[in-house]
Amino acid sequence: MSNHEQHDAAHRPVQRKEMSRRQFLSYTLGGTTAFMMGGAVLPMVRFAVDPLLKKKEKADFVKVVEESKITTEPQEFKFKIHQVDGWYESDPELVAWITKDASGNIYALSPICKHLGCTISWNTLGQNEYNCPCHGARYSIKGKNLAVANYPLDQYALQIENGFVYLGSIQPNTEVKA
Ligand code: FES
């Protein structure tokens, strides 16, 4: 390049790539719309999938009563459990009949009659049995079905820790054979 050409290039106006008004408007509007949509939609997506992302709570055991209060005579104990079903949380009250057998084994029976689901009670007829008021089902102290119902009473999973009885989920009776 000659001296003359170098001088011309130095004094030529700088060519900048200009953004058209249309491009500027579409970038600005597009960016603003995307930002606003993200702000509105992301919380909805999170709300929809949040329960799925949470770890499924393990079947918790609930502290119910001091171990020292359990006798060989069945006693009724009430306790509450915390339930989470999707977005619905509740604290229903449950009932257990808890007994200690001759060898010191503690077990907790469900009060739900295995005939049609009424609530049983201990010894209402004075025969040292569980009795159902609806259709006369009877169960032994271990929950064995003696009349009307076809299955033994269910029992709660049970743990003893630091002198307290903890109850978990309801499961088939392992104290007796059907
Ligand atoms: S529901 Fe208990 S005997 Fe029918």
Image (cartoon, rainbow, N blue to C red):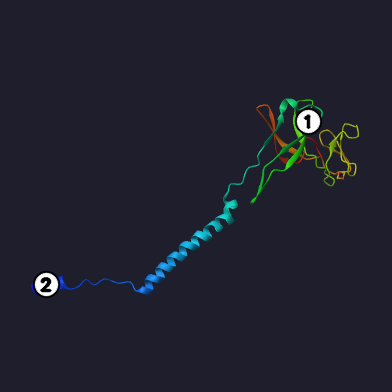
User: For mark 1, does the 10 Å Cα neighbourhood hold few (<14), some (14 to 19), or many (20 or more) residues?
Assistant: many
Left or right relative to 17: residue 146: right
Left or right relative to 28: residue 115: right
Give the structural element (helix, strand or loop) at label 2.
helix
Quadrant of the rendered image containing residue 105? top right
Which amino acid does the dot numbered 1 rest on? Thr
Quadrant of the rendered image containing residue 110? top right
Q: Is mark 2 within 8 Å of ligand 1?
A: no
The location of residue 94, given as percent across then percent down, is 75, 40
The label shown at residue 99 is 1
Quadrant observed for ligand 1 in the rendered image: top right
Q: Residue shown at 57%/52% (left/top)?
A: 50
Q: Residue shown at 78%/30% (left/top)?
A: 99
- The residue under label 2 is 7
User: For mark 2, does the 10 Å Cα neighbourhood hold few (<14), some (14 to 19), or many (20 or more) residues?
Assistant: few
Distance from disc 2 to disc 1, alpha carbons, whole Å, reads 107 Å
Which amino acid does the dot numbered 2 rest on? His
Chain-order first, disc 2 or disc 1:
2
The location of residue 31, given as percent across then percent down, is 43, 65
- The N terminus - image quarter: bottom left
The location of residue 82, given as percent across then percent down, is 67, 42
The location of residue 118, given as percent across then percent down, is 84, 44
Give the structural element (helix, strand or loop) at label 1.
strand
In the rendered image of this protein, does residue 108 appear above or below residue 12? above
Give the number of marks: 2
Relative depth, front residue between 5 and 151: 5
Left or right relative to 144: residue 79: left
Q: Residue shown at 65%/39% (left/top)?
A: 60
